[in-house]
Amino acid sequence: MTTDPQYPLTESEASAEAARLIREAYRQEAELRPSPTYFRDDSPVPRIGSMPPVPQPDSRIVPEWAAGVAVASIGVGAGVTGLGCAAWLVLQGISSVLDSAASVSLLGVLAIVGPFAGVATIATAVGVAVSKAKRASTTNIYRGSVVQRTEITSTARGIGARSRIEG
């Protein structure tokens, strides 16, 4: 059988090579089984034991201070919008009482509400800074025995649901 690319295979050699490749591709062997991609440890675990404490880090996606700032910012925006609407209504009422040709523009309302928005934003920033300065860093030290409880009961009463671990 010739395997040099300069000399092509004859018809019978090509047929034999094709048959060999097909047989090799479709052969079934025990060692070709896929290996498991998981491991389950079935060793018994003591219900109460002297297992050392395991650190359980906080894994929230959004920090608490960031959520607080977001809520405060929404409040500032809603408050300033209310002030702007009130200013527009007052100025519309004044212009209709005076029967003047002057109309209230968006720029005029923004000029009135702008300082309030600035003061509210600065107050929010100062509140966040004071809150972060007051809060000391907490270091959790886990002590005590580890208890494994797997019985979970859940009862739904009224509006909310309550989960209780009993064991």
Image: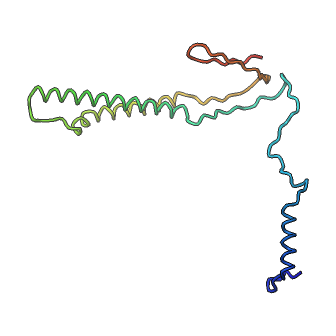
Front residue of this view, candidates 82 and 125 = 82
Q: Where does the image place residue 94, in percent across and percent down from the top left?
A: 14, 27
Residue 54 falls in image quadrant: top right
The quadrant of the picture occupied by the N terminus is bottom right
Q: Where does the image place residue 96, in percent across and percent down from the top left?
A: 12, 28
Front residue of this view, candidates 103 and 17 = 17
**Residue 16 in the figure: left or right of residue 117:** right
Q: Where does the image place residue 28, in percent across and percent down from the top left?
A: 88, 57
- Which residue: 77% across, 28% down? 53
**Residue 160 in the figure: left or right of residue 129:** right
- Which residue: 52% across, 27% down? 134
- Which residue: 22% across, 27% down? 89
Residue 165 falls in image quadrant: top right
Image: 38 above or below 45: below
Image: 106 above or below 98: below
**Residue 63 in the figure: left or right of residue 40:** left
Front residue of this view, candidates 87 and 120 = 87
